[in-house]
Image (cartoon, grey):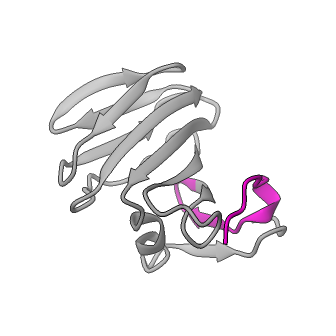
Amino acid sequence: MNRYFIEPDDVETIVFDWGTIKWTSAPKVSGSKRFSAGIVLMNPGKGHDTHNHPGCEEVLYCISGCGKQTVAGQEKELKPGMTIFIPPDISHSTINTGWEPLKILVVFDPPGPEEFQKTLPDCKVIPAGKLP
């Protein structure tokens, strides 16, 4: 199965108390085998706890908004146009420090963390085409 064109309404919405994620390319969505990618919308003043992804690289690209990004204890202001590389097993966190949603493109290599997120107790999955 390969899907070449995926729109946001085509995929489920992953909801946390800090914001939402739409995985627009992942093995179960597009048939991709080597990476997953999605859009994160982080609510103003919210963030997620420090965590890591065992054996998985992560790339973040800030589309809009502002925040604070921490990687391996190093903290940096997050702003549009910035790319962040997070090696496997490295602890990191993101906090929206602005008044508007923080919009980030996230890519995992290899895929997998996007499925793990659905097992977290504070996660709610909204079916494709439905509003959170």
Percent x, y for residue 77?
37, 21
Magenta span contains residue 14: yes
Percent x, y for residue 48?
39, 52
Specify the quadrant that holds the N terminus.
bottom right
Mark count: 0
Q: Quadrant of residue 127?
A: bottom right
Residue found 57% across the figure and 35% down from its top: 102
Q: Answer whether residue 46 is visible to the viewer in this image.
A: no
Q: Nearer the viewer, residue 112 or 101?
A: 112
Specify the quadrant that holds the C terminus.
bottom right
Q: Answer whether residue 48 is visible to the viewer in this image.
A: yes
Is residue 4 shown above or below 14? above
Residue found 64% across the figure and 32% down from its top: 100
For this view, does 74 lie left or right of residue 97? left
Is residue 98 shown above or below 20? above
Residue found 23% across the figure and 37% down from its top: 71
Find the magenta span and give its range: 1-19
Q: Residue furthest front?
A: 1
For this view, does 75 lie left or right of residue 66? left
Is residue 15 shown above or below 5? below
Q: Quadrant of residue 13?
A: bottom right
Q: Quadrant of residue 89?
A: bottom left
Magenta span contains residue 10: yes
Percent x, y for residue 114?
47, 65
Is residue 49 shown above or below 64? below
For this view, does 16 lie left or right of residue 89? right
Residue found 41% across the figure and 52% down from its top: 108
Percent x, y for residue 109?
37, 53
Q: Nearer the viewer, residue 6 or 117?
A: 6
Q: Nearer the viewer, residue 7 or 39?
A: 7
